[in-house]
Image (cartoon, rainbow, N blue to C red):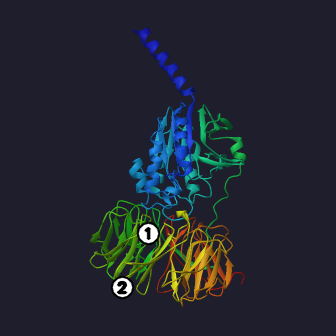
Amino acid sequence: MKRLLLIISAICSLVAVYAEDRPIKVALLADLHITPNNDNDKIMPSLVEEINGNKYDLVIVAGDLTNIGSYDELRCAHNHLKQIKHRQIVTHGNHETTWSESGGKDFERLWGHNGCTTARVGEYLFVAFPAGPYVKMADGTAQDSARLKWVENQLKKGERGKIISICHYPLNGDLTNRDQVTSLMKRYGVSASLCGHYHKPQLMNFDSLPGIVGRSLMLPTGDGRNYGYTELVIRGDSIHIAEKVIGKPTEHRHTICQVTDSHINSITPSPATEPLEYSHFDAECIITDNAAIYTAAQRVDNTLYYGNSAGEVKAYSIDSKRFKWIYRFRDPIYSTPIVTEDKVIIATLSQGIVALNRYSGKRLWTNNDGNTFIGNGTLHDGYIYIGARGKMYKINCNTGQTAWCYTFGEAHPQAWPTVTGDKLIFGAWDCNLYCVDCNSGKELWRWSNGSKNRLFSPGNVVARVADDRVMIVAPDRYMTAIDLNSGEQIWRIKERKVRESTGLSSDGKVFYSKTMDGQMIAVPMDTNFYTELWCTDAGWGYDHSFCPLIVSDDIVYMSNRRGKVAAVSSSGELLGVGKFANSTANDLRIDSNDNIWASFIEGTIWRLRVVQKQIGQ
């Protein structure tokens, strides 16, 4: 018996040694960008066949499975991936979250989780987590403390030096809270971080943590394009990285040592995060929330109303510095609460539109037809106008009853609609701008930008109206003037790289927009051709923040993706630039004292106002 036990012990030891020495082979897919019937969709069966023909221990899909995150695209990607015979771990990327008409619920519906998932292969633990932007164009963020706590709890289950993290976004300056994330990774001995997003395979230095960027499904080449994925072989203390083009032999690219690698440390890391600086402003941080904030902060009297990514709608007393009440929903809140004389009305992802008592937070009524709300609504004459997937609603604030519902398609409106007289103007993520009769809900006209690319839509653009003109910009980088009554295009020009941010002067005579080069431009509303009054550079360079511009006391405010706010006079002088956060502002709102209230995605709310002194004086 003793001899038998010795034999069993020896066999177990040999098995353990073999298991420890046995390499782990991983297929890393990223940036599939599948739309039904596009070239990437058509190549997927060949990719699946090739992966199934190899002996992989794990297949990792590191985000951007689709182009706009629609249910049709997600279902198409899911149908392909479920044909893979090997174990999988799948998280989503910015193309699943930024333009998602379901606020990420469609991904959960198909994969059964919200992008946070793990897999254990031998002694190695793989931990995947998503990092937005969520619903709005911005830099990435690991969203909130609850999500990072989940990541930390998973990391605790792994062994130092044998943990691999997966996040679509590289853990560099494109992630607004990268310092927090990389310090967490290093604290628990993460070996390497896998990601996508940049499409080209490369090694990166994430604050001394090895970063491995997987190639996209399609890569352009000198003579066309090729399709493939990244292959990893983990053995001992090293990771061998190769590129696998469909139908061709595997080509080795790099070998790195896990955790500490001289080659990784020789790669320049991202610059350190800029410190906050707002000497040109009278400013104060009023709220630091424990979750991300994707709504505006609406001040009424001395109370701030807003929602967060934890599904909480909060009423905060500015005087007592305490919350009057907190109402909790199941899902993140992306739609800014609408405050009336006695109600706070919230549009939600899965619980319809809900009215709460403004003073107590008690639920008053619910309007729920099963649609998903992520966009902002406009309050006008006792009614709310708000869009959702394929529909625009007019809802009575007092009763919660739907006055009418205009059905236009499958895309979703996102920015707050513009009411002018008896007309409602809104854009949607289907390349169209719509004009609807406020009384009947009947379509009066629709204007199309002529593109088939839905990413170029005016879906999150606030239309500005004056002098019977409708002015918009859009991600296609065009500025367009449209006749309010007929819907006919007056002029359309790609003079500067505009995107989504618009504003209007107090007298309605000047249209303001922000460019992707960090400039503010002013254009007269009544011109029959493009005329530029002035262009002022804020000095912050490239920007893609969606936040609308706002005018207070003849000063125009705009913000960027890194938490900066610039103030420009109505004549074009730059009055001040301040940095208040590391993430973009959701919206800028004015109170009766001309204070600007800015909510930032990272979870802070600031009160600010520029000190009226031109820069350099």
Element carrying mark 1 = loop
Residue for badge 1:
375
Nearer the observer, 49 or 231: 49
Q: Secondary structure at mark 2?
A: loop
Task: Look at the numbered discs 1 and 2 and tell me whether their residues touch, using CB distance below 8 Å.
Answer: no
Q: Quadrant of residue 416?
A: bottom left
Few, some or many C-alpha atoms within 10 Å of disc 2 (few <14, some 14-19, many ≥20)? few
Q: Is residue 590 placed above or below 216 in the rendered structure?
A: below
What amino acid is found at the position of numbered circle 2 in the picture?
Asp
Which part of the image, by quadrant, shows the N terminus? top left
- Residue 605 against residue 211 in the figure, above or below: below
Foreground residue among 188 and 88: 88
- Residue that badge 2 annotates: 381
The amino acid sitting under disc 1 is Gly
Residue 90 image point, x, y percent:
48, 45
Percent position of residue 276, x then y: 61, 68
Residue 67's tag is none
Residue 601 pos. (x, y %): 51, 65
Residue 375: quadrant of the picture: bottom left
Regarding residue 153, the answer to whether it shows in the image is no
Badge 1: residue crowd in 10 Å (few <14, some 14–19, many ≥20) = many
